[in-house]
Amino acid sequence: LAKTTQPISMDSYEGQEVNITCSHNNIATNDYITWYQQFPSQGPRFIIQGYKTKVTNEVASLFIPADRKSSTLSLPRVSLSDTAVYYCLVGDIMDSNYQLIWGAGTKLIIKP
Amino acid sequence: ETGVTQTPRHLVMGMTNKKSLKCEQHLGHNAMYWYKQSAKKPLELMFVYNFKEQTENNSVPSRFSPECPNSSHLFLHLHTLQPEDSALYLCASSPRRDRGDEQYFGPGTRLTVT
């Protein structure tokens, strides 16, 4: 069963680059790696998704090494509004259905 | 605004009550999901509907009963709940029930069972 491990919490300061690393040792060959962001009292929101190497969009970058056993979400120049819980997910096929296996998430606190 | 709405946003109910949670998506998606999020626990997938057909029920107690009358609407009917059912209930939708499809979440219903 696919499973992710990520730090429970992290602190950083405004203007810094934040990197959150997730390990997924038993990722399957055809699994995607997906990251979501969740603010208090809101549902999670998709940030970025990748399969291998590097993916970049307007809010983040995702670095995936060749063995795909880990991935790193990079948030450039964070602000106070980036304080949230970040979830790293990989998929799994269960009973012929693709499921995202949610972990506990990383609580990121940005300080002024 | 994600295009997925949920009502009510907050609900307090007794253990003998019957209530329903409503979810509506305006995105033209074909898959809809119910999740339970308890404090300090990962999201738990409860039910999945794909093209109005229930495709997954992850061992959810029968006191939770989902209904999907069309691809845009999803309900969760609640009856004789327990205090441990108090949680944030999240609805999500995606274009298909498929690998890697981005899920769009509603704001959730905060449920308290007294």
Image (cartoon, helix red, strand yellow):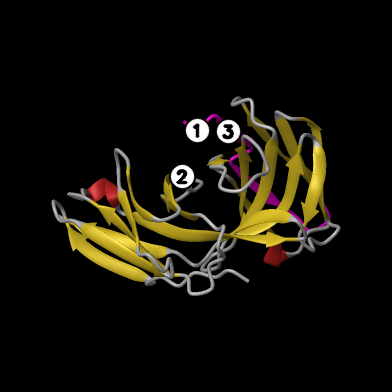
Task: Write the residue at 21% across / 48% down.
Answer: A79
Residue under label 2, please give it.
Answer: A45
Residue under label 1, please give it.
Answer: B2
Element on which disc 3 rests = strand
Disc 2 to disc 1: CB gap under 8 Å:
yes
Give the residue type at disc 2.
Answer: Arg
Q: Label 1 marks which chain's residue?
A: B
Q: What crowding class fits label 3: few (fewer than 14 Cα within 10 Å), some (14-19), or many (20 or more)?
A: many
Task: Write the residue at 53% across / 67% down.
Answer: A27
Is there one chain holding both mark 3 and mark 2? no
Q: Label 3 marks which chain's residue?
A: B
Task: Write the residue at 70% across / 28% down.
Answer: B72
Give the residue type at disc 1.
Answer: Thr
Left or right of A48? Residue B19 is right
Is there one chain holding both mark 1 and mark 3? yes
Task: Write the residue at 34% across / 67% down.
Answer: A21
CA distance for labels 3 and 2? 12 Å
Across and down, in percent, residue A64 comes to 36, 60
Across and down, in percent, residue A16 comes to 15, 56
Q: Label 2 marks which chain's residue?
A: A
Residue under label 3, please give it.
Answer: B4
Give the residue type at disc 3.
Answer: Val
